[in-house]
Amino acid sequence: MRYVSMGQVPPKRHTQFRENGTLLVEEVMGYEGFSGNESILYHLQSPCRVSEVGEFTPRVLEEWVPDAHVHRLTDTTRVAPGGDPITGRRVLMFNGDVEMAIAKPTEETEAFFRNGEGDEVLFIHEGVGEIETTFGTLPYGPYDYVVIPRGTTYRVRMHSAPQTWFCFYTPGEIETPNRYRNRYGQLLEHAPYSQRDFHAPADLVTHRERGESEVVVRVRGGYQRFTLDYHPLDVVGWDGYVYPYTFDIRDFEPKAGRLHQPPPAHQTFQGPGFVICSFCPRMLDWDPLAVPLPYHHSNLQSEEVMYYVEGNYAARRGVDVGSITLHPSGLPHGPQPGAVENALGAKSTDEMAVMCDTFRPLKLTTLARDLDDPGYALSWYDEPATAPA
Ligand SMILES: [Fe+2]
């Protein structure tokens, strides 16, 4: 991330900073102890101040252990809209590094939320709105990745319906890949995006009103509620490298080549034990003998999850917008029969998809079971081969 400063900050860190005579409360919010990226925020109130400790509600993921280990197709269009922007996230797959969920929120909450145990990425498939945060107001719309660092107190205001989000949570840190950066952290010329494509909050709004508010903190596998006697978005100014931001998938500059480009060419973010990739409309391989679809590959050490956003995904049969495919480790996968012949000579593709590859096996939830298409495992099975006469 780049350095951003919003609102009022004093010229020197850790010095007296007053507003109308009142000493403001400085909060350093950083990763890796005091060795990672950080921001410094100046609050009207101590961010520790709570008037009441509410209840703790454990988060329960209902795991589904399937009878068979096969490729899976999940139809998320069958998920009914409902819930709020936090508890309405319905987890489909998870491991110790990442959770993937579908959310179609319809209800706003007055309560604020803070993820106290991980970073979040929301891929906004449908919906417009804004996220009110301690760092300011972050507008979002379709095609945005919204990256929310842990520790950010926020509340979502939805301005349209429907809202459809593909959501990631990680106990690790969401980053852009190291290989896109120089030794100072600046994005390199060959990176598929530049610092200009990452959008910090648009406005910092300092709430001075008193009165009761509620903050729900995801921590230790559950939700801890607190009551405050002030508005938690009380920041007068902040600066640093940690803040929520958006990145529009349409600003990803896809790579094309004479021959097929492998998934790392599409990498957008990384976290510990997983990557997030963006498959965007692009020109296809231009060698006269090129095979423009992926070659068959064996995921020896990874699981591939693909969420289909729009366009026609030529390599996959029966896959439509809102589908998710899971190609787990241990099994080879590739285009279905006929797909390669049909694609030969194609000059471009209009596919758009978000992929998450994990290095550790994924577990499934009962929601994934309910949306599962058991026929997908057999979708490479063509007509029985006829014996030569
Ligand atoms: Fe693949």
Image: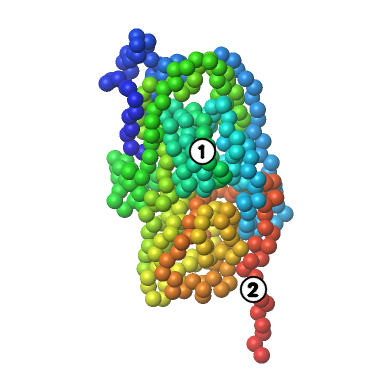
Kindly identify the amino acid type of the residue bearing the numbered disc 1.
His
Q: Residue furthest top?
A: 21
Report which residue position mark 2 lands on.
382
Label annotation for residue 140: none
- Point out residue 365 in the picture as x, y percentages from the top left corner: 66, 45
- Compared across the picture, whether 77 is left or right of 19 comes to right
Q: Amino acid at mark 2?
A: Asp
Left of 307 or right of it: where is 241?
left
**Where 28 sits versus 261, above or below?**
above
Seen at 69% across and 46% down, the residue is: 366
* Mark 1 Cβ inside 8 Å of ligand 1: no
What's the residue at 62%, 46% (across, down)? 92
300, 347: nearer the viewer: 347
Label 1, on which residue?
159
Task: Nearest to the eye among marks 2 and 1: give it.
Answer: 1
Residue 375 shows in this picture: yes
